[in-house]
Image (cartoon, rainbow, N blue to C red):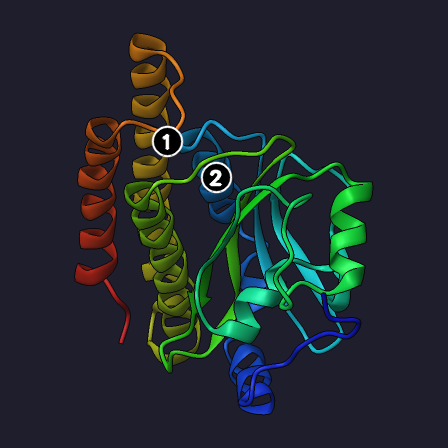
Amino acid sequence: MSSAPLFPDNESERLRSLRSYDVLPTLIEPIFDEFVALTAQVFSLPISLIAIVEEDEVLYPANHGMPGNDRQPRAEALCSTAIQQSRAVVYHDLLLETTATITAEAALAAQQNELRFYAGSLLRLPDKSPLGTLCIIDRQPRTFSAPEQQVLDQLAALISQAIAVRHNCLYHSSGGSEQWEKLRVQLQEELRELTALVRYLFTRHGVQIPVPTELLAQVQRRLHDFQFLLDEQQCS
């Protein structure tokens, strides 16, 4: 394992893009808390976070399941490995993980927090710069199937798109505040309906690990409806 944080080659450009989109003020909106709560429920996991990887630290503006965990030194954060590699990462059992992309500090922090499973999918801005991850965490080792990864990627893409749409509405559109408010209400209603669907499916079929493909397919169909709202009502 590495003893220092690993940075991508385009780090300075990535940070400029992150700040130009006012990402952290955006993520204060309650809709993103609902996103991480839904994500945790979809995968039957106790923890889901939106992680924003800044220059020296990682911030968690949307947090389900780890109260009080609002920031962490970058060297200690597993989310940093996804930024360094510019791709989704999965660690099925952190106690057995030997990859050089995990810093010694991150391995120790995971052990101290009794974390065993981690999966993170990149959040990207419109210029494709990775700003952080949507991640899910368990205190037990866990398998993670390819269909599950697809759904996590889809959720991350929708969060990324929502960040960009909000920015366009508020900063590049006449009457954009009203447009965003109307859209936000619609999006939150979709999220709540999907959360209710997931709760019903797991009540009916029970919790299964990995999540069965047929259940994930129902979730994906509803996520396509969510994307339709974002695609059709982007501010310009």
Residue 211 position in % (x across, y down): 34, 28
Where's residue 180, x and y in %?
Answer: 36, 59
The three-letter amino acid code for the residue at tag 2 is: Glu
Secondary structure beneath dot 2 equals: helix
- Reading the image, the residue beneath label 1 is 192
**In what quadrant of the picture does the C terminus appear?**
bottom left
Q: Is residue 196 left or right of residue 113?
A: left
Position of residue 36 measured from the top left corner of the image (x, y, whole percent): 50, 42
Where disc 1 sits, the SS reads helix
What residue appears at the point 28 percent right and 70 percent down from the top-left corner?
A: 235
In the displayed structure, 87 sits above or below 129; it is: above
Residue for point 51% across, 34% down: 142
* Residue at 48% across, 39% down: 34
Q: Can you tell which mark lies on residue 34?
A: 2
Q: Amino acid at mark 1?
A: Arg
Q: Quadrant of residue 204?
A: top left
Do the residues bearing badges 2 and 1 touch, measured as CB atoms within 8 Å? yes
Q: Is residue 182 visible?
A: no
